[in-house]
Amino acid sequence: MFKKVVKPLFADLFLIVCLLTSLKTSAQQKVAIDDRVNQHIFAYSEIAYLEDPNGTLQFNQVATPQMSSKFEPSWSSTPQNYNRSSAYWYKISVEHTTTRKSWILEFFDQTIDDITAYVPLGNGTYKIEKFGALHKFAERQTKHKNFEIDLDTRPAGTYTYYFRIKSHQTADVIIVLRSVKWFIEYALSEYLLFGVFYGMILVFAFYNLLMFVAIRQKQHLYYVLYNLSVGFYELCNDGIGYQYLWPDSPVWNEYAYGFALCCVSVFALMFTNNLLIVKKNAPALYKLINVTIAARMGFFFVCLLLNKQWFNYKFIEAGPLCIAFYTGVYILIKGYKPARFFVLGYSFLFTGFILKILAYLGWLTLSGVGYYSLSICFILEMVFLAFAIGDNVRVLKKEKENAQREMIDQLMEKQELEESINIKLEEQVRQRTGEVLENAVIIEMQNEKLNKVNEVLQQQAADILRMNLLLEKDNQELQSGFEKVTRDRIMSAGVDFEEFSTIYPDADSCYRFLADLKWSNGYKCHKCGNTHAIQGHALYSRRCGKCSYEESVTAYTIFHNTRIPITKGFYMIFLVYSSNGKISSHKLSEILSIRQSTCWAYSNRIKKLLSGRKKGIKNDLGEGWSKLVLDSHEE
């Protein structure tokens, strides 16, 4: 019973499959011109293609019945030249009817290198039209960014149009039958949208250029360059650039979009570095971004010099995009608020890029608004990046206001402390004045009896005052001498680390000593030579007021990039100096509790400096060891 049911079922399924197969491989469907519709997009069985691997087939060969039978219906709604080294022949059948409208055939993809159209004239002959990205713009039949062919009025009947297409990059063979009236309306609307799109890019760019001129923050300059790069890529991609900027230089079409994509990736990463302060917030990602910038520029020059067809590998832009997006997410998680708009903007761009990749791989068909999805995502990204820049400025302004507020609070606390001290002093003065008045009354009552004693007391008081002054002066000299003796004794070779730490008890005192020593003769920027500086972000650092280069307190000193505690580094220099370089690395390791290899490497540097600077520190008493701190470039 089961076999009786299953066998007829398989037979029916086989019949259905055969029917579907026969439908797919049936004759090519024709498209009739109908005044009731404005346009018709050719797809699937309405377009047949033939691959010419060697590119040697001629039209008189292709148009023969034997060769026409080798044409295959398109299996995709958007046929492409899947093998870019081959030439492809496409043919469509159009049924001409009595019509009042004028009609054209239009190719959407403006990047196709060469299209040779064979247009039937109605008497069995064909007219040849040539156009494409490698032909001068003035040679086009219609001065439009797309490729158009006029359909002349001819006797009613079905006509076959042939197209030979050769392109070094992937070409989307999208053929549309349009009425001229609809084409004009569509073209005007499209150019209006292009004007809005490029106008927004120019407005954003010009505004941020003014911001850069006003406040000299590099993030505005990188944002301007990034926006202009995006605009240049879109000009290359939609054909507007070829129409208006380089109509007589079709060769530039082979390089323009590769150059534009390189600029987009490079300036996007540079903008990311500067806006999110990646060097400070994520040092590892900062290095990765710099490596990616160098690699992307290297790939551009490799394509330019070796094989320009490698520019077609647009999917490599996913690398810089993912790195910038991940950097924004990472820094946002760390709590840097301006990154939120950055992440949101790149989310839109990432979505648009994914849609284009899926369409490029043939997994997704974009039409209508979807065809411009990447442009729309670029606009949304620019808007949110502008918000991110504004948020960043707001955060910096808030930090500045907080710093000013803290300074004001400190001044107010200082003023309150001074007022409190003054009040206490006034109270003490009143108390002392009361005591003096009481004593004055007593003295007045006993004035006659103690007049002589008072004179003696006054004399003694004067002598005591003089002695107090002398004692105070001696005490100051004694204290100064004691400090000098203490310092000199500590600076002798036989003191231990605990005694040495009485002068430099912690890292803060060491950094303060380094700052005073480095900039004792004034500040001078190592980048631009400017002599004006402000306090940097790090403790005791200096930030150039001209080029914003920030120099740490350990830069250009022997302590730059050292990993040992700076207090022990001071003591090691002192020990090497006081022993005239004769102390061993094993002894230093034992004294400082640091690995012997580290002591050996560090002490060798100190000994070299000591050997080269003996004349400069020979007559320097007490702190000659400090001459070994500064690097030779600083001196």
Image (spheres, grey):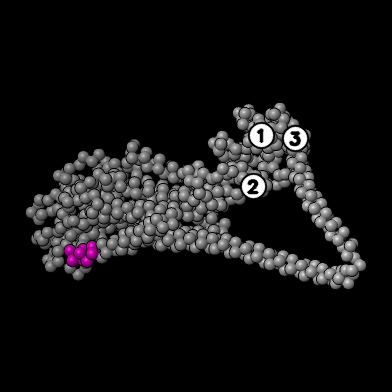
Q: Label 3 crowding class (10 Å Cα cut-off): few <14, some 14-19, many 20+?
A: some
Please name the residue shown 77% across and 37% down the image: 489
Which amino acid, mark 1? Asp
Query: Magenta stretch: dominant SS?
Result: helix
Secondary structure under tag 1 reads: loop
Where 23 sits versus 511, above or below? Answer: below
Please give the range of residues in magenta.
Answer: 180-188
Where 581 sits versus 47, above or below? Answer: above
Image location (x, y in percent) of residue 196? 31, 63
Image location (x, y in percent) of residue 378? 38, 58
Please name the residue shown 41% across and 50% down the image: 267
Q: Is residue 532 visible?
A: yes
Disc marking residue 492: 3
Closest to the camera, between mark 2 and mark 1, is 1
Compared across the picture, whether 16 is left or right of 274 comes to left
Tell me how far mark 3 sits from mark 1, CA to CA: 14 Å
Which amino acid, mark 2? Arg
Q: Label 2 crowding class (10 Å Cα cut-off): few <14, some 14-19, many 20+?
A: some
Disc on the earlier residue, 2 or 1: 2
Whether residues under marks 2 and 1 lie with C-beta atoms below 8 angstroms apart, the answer is no
